[in-house]
């Protein structure tokens, strides 16, 4: 979907009357996009087709057989009946809701002073925040686990949500968003008698919409797919999100690739829907960062 | 107006916070509700005269002093064995009213990461279902209770060769829970097409049959599987020397074995994807792309899930033998965390799970074998020789094979590193045409430096 929108943009710029060079460049862009699309979409198509395959279809053939001959929905039915899918989806929904809303609030609150105010050590603080992005998750996992344990949040949703409630990347992204808003807008608001809070909440925050959209999508995907952390924190299978719940399809003595593929598709559908709804924010973000150049 | 907006925003924040705490609380409530329920069942089972107030008196007054909560971590056993595991929990709790058992099932791929993180924060589950490789790693690091001491009373009930599986640096750190040996599931139709009326009995025979099978049916015969490192001990080539300080697999026999494997590979008799775990053997067998599958009968049911037709016509036979005539017994183990807060209860539960009755029950349910001598004498394991069902028959042969089976995993901490070195060397032989003798020498050096660490 995002692709077609970008393609439309390219088409539009062509209509505006650019030369052959532009056309050639557009052709190159198409080709590149096509290759990237193929690379990224084939595993998805494979999973999709595996989930629809009946007993008679082969799964691990070379080259892969993408169109099933023995199409069946029984894999989906079987997954739906053997696991409490609606419960897992609801759990994921709760975790994802906070996993999206909290970073939006906290990251922009942290980014605002870093972008719009002047105080001593501002750049140092920003650099320190950015520096944490270099540390891989695996390194911080054990310390974070200890902190969550000491806070008494083990086994609770708060224990899953809190570590991701604010991220260095989110602060960086929001700061970028704030910086791009012209200073004049803020100055006119000051002349009109607005205080700092009003400038943040009523003026600048709404103008951040494209960036907020990007952060929302990224946090959504991260929370939805979160696997290892909930596994470490949660201990009651009834509180498992869908990613953990689906893992039960892979037993110690059994593993049915068709069912696992069907489960993966079930877990993926909501992500696809959200992406389709919010994809215009990606385009807006692309615009907002390219207008100046 | 502005103030109202601010107030609204603050309200939202507070509400959000409250929701988080609320979800946290409700979670806690659920568990404690579950706990109370458990206690009630205990009460009913152990004592029906007393009322609620008598509960505490009962527990303290009984001769059983075990108490506390025991977290039991299993690997990928839920939901398939939910009833069995809950049965274990309930009967143990009714025997020991002071103890509550909590079952926590984790996915197979994540066990290592999970256990390492929890070990680092001193939060290991009290009782853990661990594979043998990992018992050695965790045992060597002092994370597990020494079973030579803690379970000295039950040591003699286990097969000695399998009890030793949990040993590293001279001590045993786990109780064997169940074990698997191999059987052979084969496709008589494919064999018939190729002109054979019986499955192979040895690896040598299997390789001899393979070219004909491939030519006549297009299916593979014998293949190299991901556990290829065990071909060494199965063919009389030891991994390590007597005192486990140096590699001992770089022998003329090993060079000969790998030279043959390389020839078979060049002839197209097997696919490297199988060795690299990119293709599942169950899947290949279910699609009749391989004539037989040398594996534990507990995995035969995967074929049944994938293709009932192929399973229906399959038969089972005794496992293929190498020149040493020995089978590998690979136990799953029950280990107790050395930092457990209720260690006595945890050790008692570990012994309970691995006692003859419970092992036998699990073996029957999962088509695995009990490593307790008393349990294997059950008539169940002498049955199935003439069964039409491949799993039943496979179980019979696998149980027979237990007599000659031993645990072939070297008793050192760096097992995974040793396998890795062997696999890397073997892949160099197949893919880069490295001379087998050179590859083995390099693997030997790598293993030696691993052991010296």
Image (cartoon, rainbow, N blue to C red):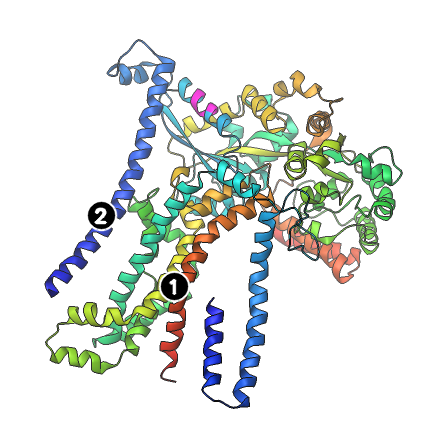
Q: Magenta stretch: give its range.
A: B87-91
- Observer able to see residue B443: yes
* Residue A169 visible: no
**Which chain is disc 2 placed on?**
B
User: Is residue B280 positioned above or below A20 on the image?
Assistant: above
Q: Quadrant of residue A131?
A: bottom left
The mark closer to the camera, 1 or 2, is 1
Instruction: Report the residue at 80% width, 59% height from top.
Output: B435
Which residue of the protein is positioned furthest toward the bottom in this rendering? Answer: A19
Position of the N terminus of chain B, as image quadrant, is bottom left
Disc on res. B18? 2
Q: Nearer the viewer, residue B201 or B303?
A: B303
Q: Main secondary structure of the magenta part?
A: helix
Q: Is residue A105 magenta?
A: no
Q: Secondary structure at mark 2?
A: helix
- The answer to whether mark 1 and mark 2 are in CB contact below 8 A is no
Residue A252 position (above or below residue A163): above
Rendered location of residue B228, percent (x, y) = 71, 46
Classify residue B66 by image quadrant: top left
Q: Looking at this rendering, what residue extends furthest in the top direction?
A: B49
Percent position (x, y) of residue B374? 62, 18
Residue B346 higher or lower than A165, as above or below: above
- In the picture, the disc for residue A278 is 1
Q: Position of residue B303 (x, y in %)?
A: 67, 37
Do tags 1 and 2 sit on the same chain? no
Q: Secondary structure at mark 1?
A: helix
Is the residue marked by circle 2 packed among few (<14), some (14-19), or many (20+) residues within 10 Å?
few
Q: With A99 as the anchor, is A267 left or right in this view?
A: right
- Measuring from the top left, give residue B426's x and y in whole percent: 73, 54
Q: In the depicted view, which residue is nearer to us: B157 or B291?
A: B291
């Amino acid at each position: 979907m995002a692709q077609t929108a970008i393609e439309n943009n390219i088409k539009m710029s062509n209509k505006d009357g650019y030369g052959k060079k532009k056309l050639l460049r557009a052709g190159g862009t198409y080709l590149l996009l096509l290759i990237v699309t193929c690379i990224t979409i084939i595993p998805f198509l494979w999973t999709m087709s595996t989930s629809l395959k009946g007993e008679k279809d082969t799964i691990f053939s070379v080259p892969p057989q993408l169109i099933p001959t023995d199409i069946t929905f029984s894999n989906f039915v079987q997954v739906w009946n053997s696991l409490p899918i609606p419960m897992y989806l609801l759990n994921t929904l709760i975790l994802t809701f906070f996993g999206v809303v909290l970073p939006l609030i906290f990251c922009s609150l942290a980014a605002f002073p870093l972008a719009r105010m002047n105080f001593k050590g501002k750049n140092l603080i920003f650099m320190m925040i950015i520096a944490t992005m270099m540390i891989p998750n695996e390194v911080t996992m054990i310390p974070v686990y200890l902190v969550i344990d000491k806070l008494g949040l083990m086994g609770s949703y708060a224990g899953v949500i809190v570590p991701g409630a604010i991220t260095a990347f989110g602060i960086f992204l929001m700061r970028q968003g704030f910086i791009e808003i012209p200073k004049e807008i803020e100055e006119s608001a000051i002349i009109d008698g607005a205080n700092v809070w009003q400038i943040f909440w009523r003026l600048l925050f709404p103008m951040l919409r494209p960036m907020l959209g990007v952060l929302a999508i990224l946090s959504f995907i991260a929370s939805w797919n979160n696997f290892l952390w909930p596994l470490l924190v949660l201990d009651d299978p009834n509180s498992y999100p869908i990613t953990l719940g689906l893992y039960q399809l892979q037993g110690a003595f059994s593993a049915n690739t068709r069912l696992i593929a069907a489960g993966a598709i079930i877990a993926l559908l909501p992500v696809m829907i959200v992406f389709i709804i919010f994809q215009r924010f990606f385009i807006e973000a692309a615009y907002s960062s390219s207008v100046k150049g | 107006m502005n103030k109202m907006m601010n107030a609204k925003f603050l309200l939202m924040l507070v509400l959000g916070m409250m929701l988080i705490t609320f979800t946290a609380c409700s979670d806690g409530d659920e568990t404690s509700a579950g706990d109370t329920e458990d206690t009630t069942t205990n009460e009913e089972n152990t004592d029906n005269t007393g009322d609620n107030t008598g509960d505490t008196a009962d527990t303290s007054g009984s001769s059983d002093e075990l108490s506390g909560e025991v977290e039991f971590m299993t690997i990928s056993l839920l939901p398939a064995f939910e009833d069995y595991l809950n049965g274990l929990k309930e009967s143990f709790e009714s025997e020991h009213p002071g103890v509550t058992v909590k079952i926590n099932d984790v996915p197979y791929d994540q066990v290592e990461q999970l256990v390492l993180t929890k070990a680092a924060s001193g939060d290991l589950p009290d009782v853990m279902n661990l594979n043998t490789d990992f018992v050695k790693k965790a045992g060597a690091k002092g994370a597990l209770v020494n079973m030579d001491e803690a379970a000295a009373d039950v040591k003699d009930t286990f097969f000695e060769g399998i009890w030793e599986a949990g040993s590293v640096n001279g001590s045993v750190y786990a109780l064997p829970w169940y074990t698997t040996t191999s059987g052979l599931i084969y496709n008589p139709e494919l064999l018939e097409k190729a002109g054979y009326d019986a499955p192979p009995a040895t690896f040598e025979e299997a390789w001899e049959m393979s070219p004909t099978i491939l030519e006549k049916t297009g299916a593979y015969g014998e293949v190299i599987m991901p556990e290829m490192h065990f071909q060494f001990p199965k063919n009389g080539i030891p991994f390590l020397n007597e005192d486990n300080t140096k590699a001992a697999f770089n022998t003329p026999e090993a060079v000969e074995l790998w030279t043959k494997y390389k020839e078979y590979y060049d002839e197209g008799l097997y696919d490297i994807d199988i060795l690299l775990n990119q293709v599942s053997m169950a899947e290949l067998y279910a699609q009749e792309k391989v004539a037989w599958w040398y594996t534990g009968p507990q995995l035969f049911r995967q074929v049944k899930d994938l293709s009932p037709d192929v399973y229906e016509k399959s038969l089972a036979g005794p496992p293929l033998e190498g020149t040493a005539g020995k089978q590998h017994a690979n136990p799953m183990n029950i280990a107790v965390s050395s930092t457990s807060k209720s260690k006595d209860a945890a050790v008692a539960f570990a012994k309970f799970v691995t006692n003859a009755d419970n092992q036998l029950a699990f073996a029957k349910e999962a088509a695995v074998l009990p490593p307790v001598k008393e349990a294997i004498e059950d008539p169940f394991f002498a049955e199935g020789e003439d069964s039409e069902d491949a799993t039943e028959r496979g179980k019979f042969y696998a149980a027979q094979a237990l007599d000659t089976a031993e645990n072939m995993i070297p008793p050192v901490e760096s097992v995974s590193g040793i396998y890795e070195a062997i696999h890397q060397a073997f892949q160099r032989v197949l893919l880069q045409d490295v001379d087998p003798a050179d590859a083995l020498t390099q693997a030997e050096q790598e293993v030696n430096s691993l052991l010296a660490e």
